[in-house]
């Protein structure tokens, strides 16, 4: 499907790997200029090479921690100068690295979860809005999680941060509707992300097999989906890319589950 992205400009925060990179690839496949932002430089070179090979003109990688608002402002100022002061797409695909039950979490862990999971998104949207408002069309897509709808006791702070993403995104959709800037949320379920694959290794499971991965999730956490396998990053990226595209002309304020049917339970 032609998403209408040729010559569009896009920023994917958390685009160096996982679902963020999968989204960036979809945008690149359709001809968008894509900048990927990551907290570390480790994966950026490979990501940019991949995006360029897929057809993204002027693909680039930038190191920035979205929690550092000053650095975020610097990055978007650089992009503004490079791309003529306009931006069509902002994707926020980062999440906190905090796990633990309410009983176990410290104040510092709560603060880190909110900073990484929600305030980073606030910083990037704040920096991007002047560029998005100057573009002929613009979209924002923020990544949340299905755990905001189906709670897990070991994700208390993580889920709280993602719930903030949901609320702020809904408010932004209301605020920006008169400008025809569409704001939506993607809520992945049990997807074979780096974090989930890392957990699978700790319990001796081959996370590369999505069926075995779902078996392990079922055993340790209860069955979270109707489908018998875990999801793949590309399957989430395709949905996020559609929401970010010109093909999506009227959906805003939505929270789209990509979760194998877990919301049915």
Image (cartoon, rainbow, N blue to C red):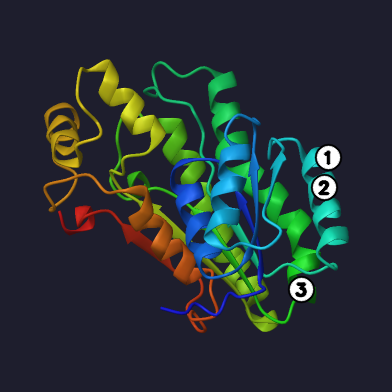
Q: Sequence-wise, which precedes: disc 3 or disc 2?
A: 2
Residue 236 in sight from this viewpoint: yes
Relative to 40, does residue 62 appear above or below in the rendering? below
Q: Is label 1 in contact with label 3 (beta carbons under 8 Å)?
A: no
Q: Residue at x 85, y 52 (%)?
A: 78
261 to the left or right of 33:
left
- Residue under circle 3? 133
Image position, residue 50 (x, y; %): 54, 49
Residue 84 lies, in percent from the top left, at 85, 68
**In the shown orientation, is residue 82 left or right of residue 183?**
right
**Label 1 vs label 2: CA separation?**
5 Å
Q: Tell me the SS state at disc 2.
A: helix
Query: Residue 239 at x, y = what percent?
Result: 40, 64
Q: Please, is residue 259 above or below residue 256 in the view?
A: above
Residue nearest the observer in this picture, 69 or 231: 231
> Measuring 80% from the left and 56% from the top, which residue is drawn there?
79
Q: Which residue: 36% across, 23% down?
A: 101
């Amino acid at each position: 499907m032609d998403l209408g992205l040729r010559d569009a400009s896009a920023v994917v925060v958390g685009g160096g790997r996982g679902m963020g990179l999968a989204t960036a690839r979809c945008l690149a496949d359709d001809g968008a200029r894509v900048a990927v932002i990551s907290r570390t430089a480790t994966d950026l070179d490979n990501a940019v090479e991949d995006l360029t090979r897929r057809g993204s003109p002027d693909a680039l990688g930038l190191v920035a921690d979205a929690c550092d608002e000053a650095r975020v402002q610097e990055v978007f100022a650089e992009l503004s100068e490079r791309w003529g002061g306009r931006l069509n797409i902002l994707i926020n695909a980062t999440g906190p690295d905090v796990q633990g039950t309410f009983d176990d979490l410290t104040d510092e862990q709560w603060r880190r979860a909110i900073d990484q999971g929600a305030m980073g998104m606030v910083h990037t949207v704040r920096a991007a809005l002047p560029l998005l408002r100057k573009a002929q069309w613009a979209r924002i897509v923020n990544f949340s999680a299905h755990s905001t709808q189906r709670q897990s006791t070991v994700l208390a702070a993580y889920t709280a941060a993602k719930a903030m993403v949901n609320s702020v995104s809904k408010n932004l959709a209301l605020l920006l509707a008169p400008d025809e800037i569409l704001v939506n949320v993607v809520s992945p379920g049990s997807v074979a992300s780096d974090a989930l694959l890392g957990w699978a290794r700790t319990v001796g499971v081959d996370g590369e097999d999505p069926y075995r991965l779902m078996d392990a999730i079922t055993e340790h956490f209860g069955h979270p989906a109707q489908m018998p396998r875990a999801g793949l990053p590309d399957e989430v990226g395709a949905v996020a890319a559609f929401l970010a595209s010109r093909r999506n002309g009227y959906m805003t304020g939505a929270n789209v589950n990509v979760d194998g049917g877990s919301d049915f339970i």
